[in-house]
Amino acid sequence: MSGTTKFPKPDPKFAYWHGIDRTKIPWYPTIDEDRCIGCKLCFVSCGRNVFDFDEKRKKAVVAKPYNCMVGCSTCATICPSQAISFPDKEIVHKIEREEKILAKIQKKAREKKLKLDLEKIRNQVVESISKARTKASYQIVGHILEQKIFEKLMDAVADCPVDIVDIKINSPSLKGCWNLNAPSMAEFTVVSTEMEDITPCLDKVDEVIDRAGAIVVKKE
Ligand code: SF4
Ligand code: SF4
């Protein structure tokens, strides 16, 4: 870093490298001004604002050395006059060994995977809940009272987490009202009492209706 004794702090987002204070890692470019031809390639290509450019002197300047990505040396590779140099990469490898960076990266990767797995499971649960059938409305016709269909339904779903609500029984004629053997129409809704999928309970409901010789006009 040409002529500077105190380096500026890195930008906050580059302040730590795997938990290590970035200013404790002496990895950054140095420019040989005699070689620099002022092409600005380093200045425009570094995505971390490490370089500045002195327009008066037509020279690149290392303005924020600790913004440099540890281990990166792209600018040295692209400099057409080999004016940029870096310390020996061994200093990075030494820090990696001492600080067990690889283990930290693996741990982070495992945690990230676990987080992604949990996210996936959560999405699957949300999806299955949203797809679960928690209620079904029926309209049936048949010998509802004669066949004691509602009594049979009560027995059939006794162990299910459901209730049967909004029950309506319609008789097509006045005479039919007093005749238990007359056919009638019924509506009811089976609802989950625990916000669960009630498909298995609906199978039992369907079976009762079928055995009683009634017909399902509508089921939704
Ligand atoms: S790329 Fe090299 S020659 Fe070009 S400005 Fe940067 S240091 Fe100078
Ligand atoms: S090594 Fe990479 S991050 Fe560092 S100054 Fe050069 S281009 Fe920028």
Image (cartoon, rainbow, N blue to C red):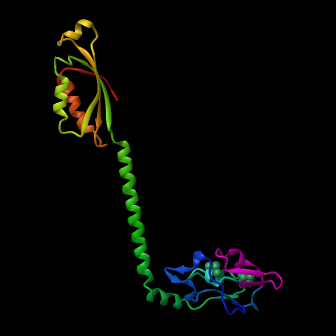
Position of residue 79 relative to residue 179, above or below, is: below
In the rendered image, residue 49 lying in the magenta stretch gets the answer yes
- Above or below: residue 216 compared with residue 120: above
Please provide percent x and percent y for residue 48.
64, 76
Q: Is 71 on the left-hand or right-hand side of 160?
A: right
Query: Horizontal placement of 80 versus 144: left or right?
Result: right
Residue at 32 percent across and 32 percent down: it is 136
Q: Quadrant of residue 102?
A: bottom left
Q: Is residue 83 left or right of residue 94?
A: right
Which residue: 16% across, 22% down?
Answer: 148
* Residue placed furthest toward the top: 175
Residue 71 is situated, as x and y percent measured from the top left of the image, at 55, 83
Q: Answer left or right for 138 relative to 45.
A: left
Q: Is residue 13 visible?
A: yes
Q: Position of residue 46 (x, y in %)?
A: 66, 76
Image quadrant containing the N terminus = bottom right
Query: Which residue occupies 21% across, 19% down?
Result: 144
Q: Is residue 190 above or below residue 70?
A: above
**Residue 182, located in which quarter of the rendered image?**
top left
> Is residue 66 found inside the magenta-colored segment of the image?
no
Q: Which residues are magenta?
A: 37-62
Q: Is residue 76 above or below residue 134?
A: below
Quadrant in which the C terminus is drawn? top left
Which quadrant of the frame does ligand 1 lie within? bottom right
Give the image location of residue 146, x and y in percent.
16, 17
- State whether residue 74 appears in this view: no
